[in-house]
Image (cartoon, rainbow, N blue to C red):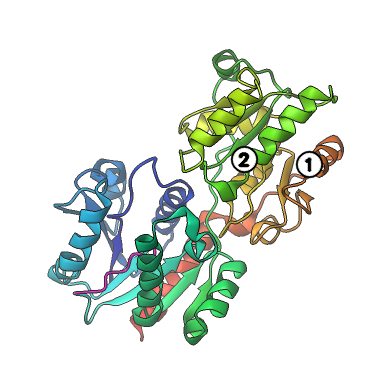
Amino acid sequence: MKLAIDLLWVRPKQVGGIESYIRNLLDGLLLLPNQEIEYWLIVSTDNEKTFLKYEKKDRCNIHVCKIKSKNVFKRIIWQNMYLGREIKKLGINICFEPYYCKPFLGTKNIKFITTIHDLQALHYPEYFSKFKVEWMKMSWRNALKTSKKIITISKYVKKDIEENFPKYGNKVEVIYNPILVDKDEIYDFEIIGKKYGIKKGEFYFTVSSLLPHKNVKTIIEVIDKIKAKNISLPRKLVISGVGGKSKSELENLIERLNLQDDIILTPFISNSERNALYKYSKAFLFPSLFEGFGMPPVEAMVLGTTVITTMSTSLKEVTFGKANYVKNPLDINEWIECMLHAKKMKYEFREFDKEIIAKKYYDTFKSVERM
């Protein structure tokens, strides 16, 4: 069996958790023994180098398409005009689409398995242009209608699809994200401490894109109240991740509250630096209002970090009820109360092991071959 995996959408270090998801999954798939699948990674000219390590693996090939992932509009047009043709040229009739962007055109006689990570544009249409909201709705419908199988990353997302697109619920299968945390991949904290002006156990940490539903504004206001009321908690907060719609608003808030020395906004950071910040923080705060999965709280707990998060959407589900939770994510006082009494609850999350998750994907691929 030959399987194409469309990776044209990957813009390295710019698509957040979805990039981690696919790279962890590829690592897991290529570790599975006794396979009957030959993988063909469909990559672009500007993300090819980041996938070259897989070419050295048995049963894995790289096919480079003459398109750049960074130009999203041109990439989408190209996918619809040429992706199906490229796949058929390779003698392949099954394709895994790890993103929602299954082509509308040119895919006749190709069986697709598509992952839908969330329906964010339905819940927060204000984040997007009207055109993009309609485009995403059309793309979801197209994927649901024409894919042989839909994979969602949590029970929450499956339920969301069943409620909003009930006609296609029978195609949906839940497979959690693979989580890969190398406990030995820890950056030298002395260097990080000097870089950001922080000390072990005397700062909070969060990983987040800077979008309104990530609710970073609330924990900035939490830090402000801790400082103003002289509450016996750390006053430093490190925020890492990709940018987003709220970045300038949050920067203005930090300046208005005079927290420039207390809140550190970092750009995208390496896994080793992220792990060190997880490990040596007082607690990892994840205030999100909406997640299809939510990998950072799981990663932090694997490293033994105290995690405080919300009960919103999928978060309690994927942390198995093992974290500390605030019931009202917008309540500053509840956050502070939880921070004062939070418990460290380490959990290994072996259920998210990359090989266990990869085997579930492998079985799904093989089942689609038989359809």
Residue under label 1, please give it: 335
Quarter assignment of residue 218: top right
Please tell me whether the stretch drawn in magenta is mainly helix, strand or loop: loop
Q: Is residue 282 left or right of residue 156?
A: right
- Crowd class of label 2 (few under 14; some 14 to 19; many from 20; radius 10 Å): many
x and y percent of residue 99 in the render?
39, 61
Q: Which residues are magenta?
A: 98-105
The residue drawn where x is 66% and y is 25% is: 257
The residue drawn where x is 33% and y is 46% is: 11
Helix, strand or loop status at disc 2: helix
Residue 153: say if magenta: no
Above or below 255: residue 327: below
Q: Which quadrant is the N terminus positioned in? A: bottom left
Question: Amino acid under label 2?
Answer: Val
x and y percent of residue 69 in the render?
26, 49
Q: Is residue 75 left or right of residue 163?
A: left
Residue under label 2, please give it: 216
**Which is more N-terminal, label 2 or label 1?**
2
Helix, strand or loop status at disc 1: helix
Q: Is residue 265 left or right of residue 279?
A: left
Q: Calculate the distance from the C-alpha at mark 1 to the C-alpha at mark 2.
A: 12 Å
Q: Is residue 118 left or right of residue 71?
A: right
Q: Which quadrant is the C terminus positioned in? A: bottom left
Is residue 282 visible in this depiction of the protein? no
Above or below 179: residue 36: below
Q: Nearer the viewer, residue 46 or 122?
A: 122
The residue drawn where x is 51% and y is 28% is: 266
Quarter assignment of residue 311: bottom right
The residue drawn where x is 39% and y is 40% is: 13
- Crowd class of label 1 (few under 14; some 14 to 19; many from 20; radius 10 Å): many
x and y percent of residue 27 in the render?
42, 51
Question: Amino acid under label 1?
Answer: Trp
